[in-house]
Image (cartoon, rainbow, N blue to C red):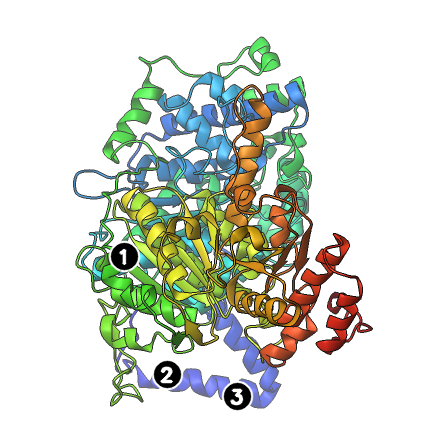
Amino acid sequence: MRMPDADADPDETREWLDALDASVRAGGKERGLFLLKKLEEQAQHLGIVAHVPPYSAYQNTIPLEEQGPYPGDLALEERITSIMRWNALAMVVRANRAYGELGGHIASYASAAEIFEVGFNHFFHAGDASRRADLVFFQPHSAPGVYARAFLEGRLTEEQLANFRQEVGGKGLSSYPHPWLMPKFWQFPTGSMGIGPISAIYHARFMRYLEHRGIAATGKRHVWGVFGDGEMDEPESTGALTLAARESLDNLTFVINCNLQRLDGPVRGNGQIIQELESLFIGAGWNVIKVLWGSDWDPLFARDTHHALLRQFAATVDGQYQTLGANDGAYNASHFFGLDPELRALVAHMSLAEIDALKRGGHDFRKLYAALRAARAHAGQPTVVLAKTKKGYGMGGVGESRMTSHQQKKLDLEALKAFRDRFRLHLSDDDLAQMRFYRPADGGPELAYLRERRAALGGALPARRDDAAPVAVPPLESYARFALDAGGHEMSTTTAVVRLIGNLLKDGALGPRIVPIVADEARTFGMANLFRQIGIYSPVGQLYEPEDAASMLRYREAQDGQLLEEGITEAGALSSWVAAATSYSVHGVAMLPFYIYYSMFGFQRVGDLIWAAADQRARGFLLGATAGRTTLGGEGLQHQDGSSHVAAATIPNCHAYDPAFAYEVAVIVDHGARQMMERQDDVFYYVTVMNENYAQPSLPAGVADDIVRGMYRLPTDDARRGDARVRLLGSGTILREVVAAAELLRDDWQIASEAWSVTSFGELAREARELERRNRLHPAQPRQSSHVERCLAGDAPVVAATDYVRAYPQLIASYVGAPFIVLGTDGFGRSDTRSALRDYFEIDRRHIAVAALDALARQQHVPGGVVEKAIERYAIDAGAPPPWTQ
């Protein structure tokens, strides 16, 4: 409501102000504050203001007179919802009755069923000729309810429902939304709490990005997220709320299922989570709509002229609301309405059964529809709907609002009968005992209505599409000549990859599809030239003159900017990368994101988001810059990465590489881009790059394929291969120490060696593991050898050195027949120079040479005394404690 420009009655205004002055003079400041608080409350009750910070009264935001008519058949929708509640319950109980160990959840969907059904029947659009589908993030524990609806729609079979959480045989359904496991069904994984909300925000933002850049029309589409109130405690759930408001993402609606309970107890037993969330979202700039009380409460509110209900609501904490919800009408009449004479009078005409039947707003179709309609129509802000529900709604004494409702997976026959009777289901006692699924007849009104409503909204949801056209990648030589023919020119591999991206951006076909992403430190990674070349995306352009306006590398924001500069938020930047990396499926347009960041803040900090990216079949590049334990010399413990490659190796569709040279980077990027954009494989690449400048050699002939396989021999000496007595393996920046160690062995000890660049211990182990299995299960067929077995055949000892923990090279240990010695950077990082750090972690050329000599001495190829001489010659402190103990 707009504030009047002029005072319509100055005399009345003066009377109010004089009265306040007199009250403060007589009763002090405390009395004045009390009066103002009461006036604020009265202003809310009268509808003058929607809310007074920090939150509004404990009532529905949309008053009855603004609610409007319900557009659907209420009776039919309630019946369909009851059927789905039963099938969801039967699915979980059957699985646990048969096997007792499969788990599953009943209570979450029971609380959210009406939310889902209002969405499915009236809002969740599946797309048509003019638009693609809405994006819907489903509360993960409610997956059985989504399956139950798909069963009624004919999308899933009874056999699939009967095999819930039994996926190994291929006939069952995944526990939570998993696009990897059900690639035609689920759009987004939400099983890890907190990932859904932040992903929804960045997907909504990426839709605007595509629209503003003219790549895809997304204006008609909407992002819906149904999340739990307990889930909002996760930092990812709330970490991007201000971004959504700052960029005016009115294409985004959250529906928070406020059943007031975490997995095993109240969310805010001594407080009110709904009021807390309202304050949080209002402060972040969101439009907030509360749906707290069902239609049965409206007559009570109409008669409550003194606001006794609102006073009691405000005084009741969530723990007590749960107790009230878990008990019957008699308990509520005594322990809520009986606390105040005005409340007792309000319900004096009601029976205990009628009091018991009073619904919370999240179970009322009319209230939910009005809220979602208002959210969809709201312009200029994202909207959150706070819907108050009961966890385990309809489960009666065994689960409704109970602390144990989340763990409830088995119900006895009496509880099932009570459930049937409450929802008026046409099920016999034998149907209940056998937990039979129920599907109405095809000619009946239920399925006809279900199909009609979904047809009006474009078809079935959730559904995942994979129909993007491939995009051609230009010839490698056309954009990577500087790296392939470096000729000793000094640069870092970070510089090399940024130049590759810059050159690819110039390609007419692939260039517009590239999405460079950085979390704040673009200049650190040498990306400042991209500011002017492609611009930084901003939905409002640039409203200021940048401090560096006169610079060739000036900071330039633009509505059609291509670079996503995310600020200091690895979780946000990774979520942005996921939105771009799944664009081929979500938007039908293949994009190729490159997210460059400090490698330490990737898998270690937001590894769960990376797993979610893998689940939803993301395609793109993650670039772990300033990688390794010793390359970022001065930063110290928390900035030095020693383990990201170990984490990356555990993700099946992640291909991880640690290249040392610019030409290796070029070959890997080219191969990955073709795999993802031309062949459209559901993989993504993690490539670590360093900030250390050194002379870059040119690409040797015939090694490109082996670079991709994971290792190749460097042309470091002119000795015949058979003359080598030891093999030295290195990756990333430590490869140069390996090459130098080979020179020490040759010059100081006259020992020939082979130096190998291992671009990926993970890729080597993956192929070897697969062939090992193949050979084991096909003993009658000729044995096949892996690339690592062929490269390291024989008994010449192998020394592998890495800037990562020893576990990384040890991925290949079981596939090497010769003695295998690993030098790595186990332990906490340190701040110092690169040379000091490499000495401390015992991975520099001197330690590599000593390790090689020791391995040869153990084979009696050199005298034992040689090792002691080498330790003395290279001034190695043999008495120093191991670095991983310090």
Q: Secondary structure at mark 3?
A: helix
Kind of residue at badge 1 = Leu
On residue 22, which mark appears? 3
Relative vertical location of residue 548 with respect to residue 540 in this rendering, above or below: below
Residues 819 and 510: in front is 819
Residues 728 and 586: in front is 728
Q: Secondary structure at mark 1?
A: helix
Kind of residue at badge 3 = Ala
Relative vertical location of residue 837 with respect to residue 83 in this rendering, above or below: below
Q: Position of residue 395 (x, y in %)?
A: 60, 30
Q: Is residue 359 visible?
A: no
Q: How far is disc 3 from disc 1 in space, using C-alphas? A: 83 Å
Residues 50 and 843: in front is 843
Query: Crowding near pointer 2: few (<14 within 10 Å), some, many (20+)?
Result: few
- The residue located at (26%, 36%) in the rendering is 457
- The residue located at (25%, 48%) in the rendering is 589
Q: Secondary structure at mark 2?
A: helix
On residue 13, which mark appears? 2
On residue 430, which mark appears? none
User: In the rendered image, which quarter contains the N terminus?
Assistant: bottom left
- Mark closest to the chain's N terminus, 2 or 3: 2
Q: Is residue 86 visible?
A: yes
Q: Position of residue 322 (x, y in %)?
A: 64, 45
- Residue lying farthest right? 879
